[in-house]
Image (cartoon, grey):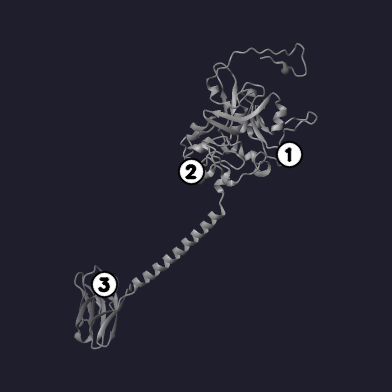
């Protein structure tokens, strides 16, 4: 049996906002000093929860669809590359079109740059920089069987709803396995949602078992 | 996929048994490769044949962008060869045309018997704007030169007795026999008209441009 394809998994629940991925991305030689990963605060006034966003590498890349200069190309392995330098006109169509807000136009150098899954690394068998440094493995690069074993409570999904557009991506996001999530994750839903006040109690000391976190009540 | 708790999976990429296994490099190793013409799927999901032409001309995927069908390649070869052939023909035609243009016409200037010794005839050769002069210097000798002084194109006047052409504008002098500039401002000899005498008729057959 052939081993499975390596994939990128984002687990926003596990993000602790340590900025390690941002710093690791900044060190990359192909775009030295500029970070391609976005570490966003979801609702900064009321929560410290952050979420890392890398390029999701869509099956039908909207950024490439809207590019008037034919500058955004996808390689055969499904990785949507940064804008081709001779072609990009820095119009910013891709910035407006991307459902995940990944591409950015750099006005000083007049080009769009975005995450390409560390193509110099991942195309020769290395993990992307951000996944090598993430201390909580909110960013994970491995097979589906690995992620299934490591995260029994979650499951990966790579289909999203953005208005009328259904997006299938190469990168997966971990969602609760037994949650009340409609068949597709709707990206626009989260925009108006506010986090509810929650109390968390950890019965760590009383009746401690092998896995204290198994009894976390939310 | 259920993991075996007895044998936990190694998450490292470079662990034994996983050498060379990457998520990206070998396209056809794990996923079935689609026809290069069918990789890019339009947002409306319809097949490529129903899509507008620009979508086939500007595909999103690199393999499809680089894919060259055999028919397209053959078309390219044929058209390129045809362009070369047409180019060669065009060059040949231009050469022939240029060569023909460079040839001087054969034109009758005057009758030998009509010119007295020491007399001259002004004629136009090879076209109507080129003034030339024919001088009978002796019984059996004829010379013909362009009449334009090589200094500033004034008309030169022959003086058979002194054996010169004289330009009255700036006192330039040319030798009557050879047309060589011998005094005054003219920088070059007069262009010589090549003559041919057949019977009683004098023909001009060409012009010899000289710098010295």
The disc, 1 or 2, on the residue closer to the chain's N-terminal end is: 1
Residue at left offset 48%, top offset 31%: A96
Residue denoted by label 2: B52
**Mark 2 crowd level (few <14, some 14–19, many ≥20, 10 Å Cα):** few
Q: Which mark is residue B18?
A: 1
Discs 2 and 3 lie in a common subunit: yes
Chain containing the residue with disc 1? B
Q: Is residue B49 visible?
A: yes
Count of labels in the image:
3
Q: Is residue B151 left or right of residue A133?
A: left
Circle 1 SS class:
loop
Q: CA distance from mark 2 to mark 3?
A: 61 Å
Taking depth in this image into account, of B74 and B25 the one nearest to the observer is B74
Tag 1–tag 2 contact (CB < 8 Å): no
Q: CA distance from mark 1 to mark 2?
A: 44 Å
**Mark 3 crowd level (few <14, some 14–19, many ≥20, 10 Å Cα):** few
Q: Is residue A194 above or below residue B60?
A: above
Circle 2 SS class:
loop
Q: Is residue B16 above or below residue B156?
A: above
Chain containing the residue with disc 2? B
The disc, 1 or 3, on the residue closer to the chain's N-terminal end is: 1
Residue at left offset 56%, top offset 52%: B69
Q: CA distance from mark 1 to mark 3?
A: 88 Å
Quadrant for the C terminus of chain B in the image: bottom left
Q: Is residue B177 visible?
A: no
- Location of residue A160 (image quadrant): top right
Residue denoted by label 3: B127
The disc, 2 or 3, on the residue closer to the chain's N-terminal end is: 2
Discs 1 and 2 lie in a common subunit: yes
Residue A70 is situated, as x and y percent measured from the top left of the image, at 50, 42
Residue at left offset 56%, top offset 16%: A46
């Amino acid at each position: 049996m052939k081993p499975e394809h390596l994939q990128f998994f984002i687990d926003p629940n596990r993000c602790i906002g340590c900025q390690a991925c941002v710093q690791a991305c900044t060190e990359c030689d192909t775009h030295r000093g500029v970070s391609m990963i976005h570490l966003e605060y979801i609702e900064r006034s009321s929560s410290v929860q952050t979420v890392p966003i890398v390029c999701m590498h869509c099956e039908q890349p909207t950024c490439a669809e809207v590019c008037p200069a034919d500058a955004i190309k996808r390689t055969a392995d499904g990785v949507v590359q940064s804008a081709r330098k001779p072609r990009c006109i820095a119009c910013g169509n891709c910035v407006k079109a991307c459902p995940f807000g990944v591409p950015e136009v750099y006005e000083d150098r007049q080009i769009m740059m975005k995450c390409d899954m560390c193509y110099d690394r991942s195309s020769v068998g290395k993990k992307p920089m951000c996944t090598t440094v993430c201390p909580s493995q909110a960013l994970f690069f491995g097979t589906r069987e690995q992620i299934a074993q490591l995260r029994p409570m979650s499951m990966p999904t790579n289909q999203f709803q953005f208005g009328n557009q259904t997006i299938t991506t190469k990168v997966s996001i971990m969602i609760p396995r037994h949650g009340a999530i409609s068949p597709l994750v709707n990206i626009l839903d989260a925009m108006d949602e506010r986090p509810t006040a929650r109390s968390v109690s950890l019965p760590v000391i009383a009746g401690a078992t092998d896995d204290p976190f198994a009894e976390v009540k939310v | 996929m259920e993991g075996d708790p007895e044998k936990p999976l190694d998450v490292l990429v470079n662990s034994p048994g996983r050498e060379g296994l990457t998520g990206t490099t070998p396209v056809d190793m794990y996923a079935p490769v689609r026809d290069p013409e069918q990789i890019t799927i339009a947002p409306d999901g319809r097949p490529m044949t129903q899509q507008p032409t620009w979508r086939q001309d500007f595909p999103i995927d690199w393999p499809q962008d680089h894919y060259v069908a055999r028919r397209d390649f053959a078309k390219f070869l044929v058209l390129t060869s045809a362009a070369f052939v047409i180019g060669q023909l065009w060059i040949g035609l231009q050469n022939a045309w240029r060569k023909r243009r460079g040839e001087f016409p054969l034109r009758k200037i005057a009758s030998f018997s009509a010119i007295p010794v020491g007399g001259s005839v002004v004629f136009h050769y090879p076209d109507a704007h080129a003034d030339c002069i024919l001088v009978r210097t002796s019984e059996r000798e004829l010379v013909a030169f362009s009449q334009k002084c090589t200094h500033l194109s004034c008309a030169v006047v022959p003086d058979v007795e002194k054996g010169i052409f004289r330009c009255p504008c700036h006192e330039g002098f040319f030798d009557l026999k050879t047309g060589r500039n011998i005094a005054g401002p003219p920088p070059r000899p007069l262009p010589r008209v090549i003559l041919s005498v057949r019977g009683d008729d004098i023909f001009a057959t060409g012009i010899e441009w000289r710098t010295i």
